[in-house]
């Protein structure tokens, strides 16, 4: 196979023609046939090893089912962003079904194969790989770590529920206990799914845990207890999982040019597809949703796709996210707090969030930004000449010039080399109790042609913080255009159910300093059930123009009249030229700012 590669020079672009063999390596050549329901892990790993040092190779599966078990899986320690603390998971070994390390120019062709995983596993890992493609694969779990039951009868004293056949349980001393291969549950995180309305809300296992349970028919359990405060009704699906993120759905670590194409994630245990310190990631036609005939409503234990400290271009196109216990897509960096100055050019840094630590967050040659934590003001820049881990929680970096004198206690360092551009186009986000997209990156962002259907929280959240999750950083160029937003934000009622939130966590406002810049929300359709549409804080040069806003009169009852727009300490805002078809007159609320900073054709109210 001939591959035409770009070669960048100081004066332009040259093209070089590299000849790479396209050897096909079939997993059935290693004595592995599909649909045997036996452990395929070892023989698949042998087939993977046969592809090593063969650029252009295609690892090919025959259609059918392949089962992966933890006993023969690869075991390797990885510290992964936003997963688990030292207390939650002291030992970070991941149990990996398909393991790829230091591969270059490899295609994994599934031909529609289904990979079924047994127990709590990380389905695949790409570690320090380049030019790698996986396509035409379906991923599922024999026993998902999510348990589901459909409510049949609900009274203040009793609930009858049909347990999904995949959700294994036992009745012990009149109490229902969920379990799977080598695991039980002691921590419970619950979401109630009203699939008819597309409404997914937080719930609690507590009334069921305290009740007395009895099996009254195959896969049917009656719970007797106090359900007077339980809000579920017949037809709702109650979903519950453990809260510990001991594995991830898949892990892409220090890779470059990774393509995922036509991948169906029917269930993922842990955080989801996590990409960490990787570059140029292109994901198209990805389904993170239950199988059509599975009878399940949840496909993801937590996030769908999580990008931490990546760079280059991230594209997510023509994909479908449905049935997740957390955010479908989250893109961010990590603020590390400055805890010491051992030398005039040396900084001691610390990971602060309990679930994010242990990986190197800065490298020699990286550009960095100094950030005041309270205001999120970036006040100086530098370049790293050396970086090393001191412990799992601490790093030491040496810079190319003396430290700024304006450093104060609690200030943070942001890696501004490892920040990506992002394009999310033609995707569907639905059946999620949290947000649709979380975006914090200073490179160009395009969110276009998507549909956000009844996300429980903000359809789009642009944050940046140095106090809670420590997820960096500011945005500088965001286009949100041609999208449809319908019935979003109901889990944040009555005060914060804005469809889009630009909400940096700058706990101290700095006069004239804007955290975020250049956000354009144009040519979208908003189908709202309540008054709030957009909230923005410390944002400069933003616009909400040429959008169409219509009213949903058959979804949820609206709350008390409130402003459609809430702006706090913003500058250069434009809200005009929009079409409104709603039974109220939209209003703009300004806080800590003056009317001259806003151009709008709507009524304005100013509050201190």
Image (spheres, helix red, strand yellow):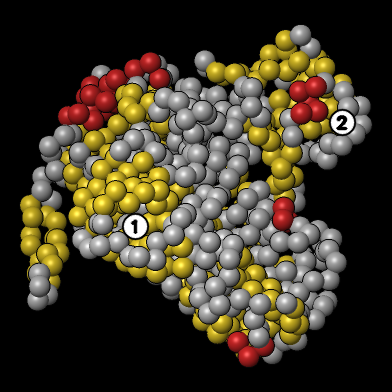
Instruction: Evaluate if marks 2 and 1 touch, with contact meaning CB atoms under 8 Å apart.
Output: no
Q: Is residue 562 left or right of residue 284?
A: right
Q: CA distance from mark 2 to mark 1?
A: 49 Å
The label on residue 300 is: none
**Crowdedness near tag 1: few (<14), some (14–19) or many (≥20) residues, C-alpha within 10 Å:** many
Residue 557, x across and y down, in percent: 84, 60
Residue 137, x across and y down, in percent: 39, 39
Chain-order first, disc 2 or disc 1: 2
Query: How many numbered marks have been drawn onto this rendered protein structure?
Result: 2
User: Can you identify the residue that label 1 sits on?
Assistant: 415
User: Can you identify the residue that label 2 sits on?
Assistant: 227
Q: What residue is shown at x 55% (from left), y 50% (from top)?
A: 468
Q: What residue is shown at x 51% (from left), y 57% (from top)?
A: 465
Residue 158, x across and y down, in percent: 88, 26
User: SS at mark 2?
Assistant: loop
Q: Which residue ends up furthest to the top in the rendered image? A: 173
Name which quarter of the figure residue 185 lies in: top right
Q: Is residue 386 left or right of residue 19?
A: right
């Amino acid at each position: 196979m001939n591959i035409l590669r770009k070669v960048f020079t100081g004066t332009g672009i040259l093209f070089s023609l590299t000849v790479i063999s396209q050897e096909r390596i079939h997993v059935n050549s290693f004595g592995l046939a599909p649909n045997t329901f036996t452990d395929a892990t070892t023989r698949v790993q042998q087939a993977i090893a046969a592809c090593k040092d063969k650029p252009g190779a295609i690892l090919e599966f025959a259609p059918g089912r392949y089962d992966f078990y933890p006993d023969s899986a690869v075991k390797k320690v990885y510290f992964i962003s936003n997963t688990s603390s030292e207390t939650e998971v002291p030992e970070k070994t991941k149990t990996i079904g398909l393991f790829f390390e230091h591969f270059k120019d490899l295609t994994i062709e599934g031909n529609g194969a289904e990979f079924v995983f047994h127990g709590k596993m990380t389905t695949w890992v790409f570690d320090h790989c380049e030019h790698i493609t996986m396509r035409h694969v379906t991923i599922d779990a024999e026993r998902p770590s999510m348990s589901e039951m459909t409510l049949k009868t609900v009274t203040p004293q009793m609930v009858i529920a049909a347990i999904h056949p995949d959700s294994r349980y036992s009745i012990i001393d009149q109490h229902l206990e969920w379990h799977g291969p080598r695991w039980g549950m002691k921590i419970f995180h619950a979401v109630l799914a009203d699939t008819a309305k597309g409404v997914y809300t937080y719930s609690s296992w507590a009334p069921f845990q305290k009740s007395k349970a009895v099996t009254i028919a195959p896969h049917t359990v009656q719970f007797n207890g106090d359900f007077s405060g339980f809000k579920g009704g017949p037809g709702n699906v109650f979903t519950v999982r453990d809260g510990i993120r001991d594995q991830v759905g898949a892990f892409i670590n220090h890779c470059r040019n990774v393509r995922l194409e036509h991948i169906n994630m029917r269930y993922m245990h842990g955080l989801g597809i996590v990409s960490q310190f990787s570059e140029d990631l292109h994901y198209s036609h990805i389904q993170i949703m239950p199988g059509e005939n599975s009878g399940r409503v949840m496909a993801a234990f937590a996030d769908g796709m999580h990008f931490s400290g990546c760079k280059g271009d991230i594209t997510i196109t023509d994909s479908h996210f449905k049935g997740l216990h957390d955010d479908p897509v989250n893109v961010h960096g990590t603020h590390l707090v400055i805890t010491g100055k051992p030398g005039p050019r040396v900084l001691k840094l610390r990971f602060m969030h309990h679930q994010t630590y242990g990986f190197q967050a800065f490298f020699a040659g990286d550009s960095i930004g100094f950030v005041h934590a309270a205001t999120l003001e970036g006040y100086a820049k530098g370049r790293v000449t050396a970086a090393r881990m001191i412990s799992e929680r601490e790093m030491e970096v040496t810079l190319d010039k003396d430290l700024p004198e304006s450093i104060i206690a609690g200030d943070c360092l942001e890696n501004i080399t490892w920040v990506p551009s992002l394009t999310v186009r033609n995707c569907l986000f639905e059946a999620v109790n949290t947000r649709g997209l979380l975006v914090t990156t200073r490179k160009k962002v395009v969110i276009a042609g998507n549909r956000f259907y009844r996300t429980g929280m903000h359809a789009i959240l642009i944050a940046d913080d140095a106090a809670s999750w420590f997820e960096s950083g500011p945005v500088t160029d965001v286009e949100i255009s041609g999208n449809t937003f319908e019935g979003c934000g109901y889990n944040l009622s009555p005060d914060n159910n804005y469809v889009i939130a630009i909400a940096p966590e700058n706990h101290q406002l700095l006069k004239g300093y804007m955290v975020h810049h250049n956000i354009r929300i144009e040519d979208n359709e908003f189908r709202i059930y309540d008054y709030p549409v957009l909230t923005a804080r410390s944002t400069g040069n933003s616009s909400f123009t040429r959008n169409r806003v219509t009213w949903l009169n058959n979804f949820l009852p609206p709350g008390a009249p409130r402003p459609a727009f809430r702006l706090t300490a913003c500058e250069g805002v434009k809200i005009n030229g929009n079409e409104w078809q709603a039974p109220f007159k939209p209003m703009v609320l300004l806080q800590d700012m003056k009317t001259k900073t806003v151009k709008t054709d709507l009524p304005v109210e100013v509050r201190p």
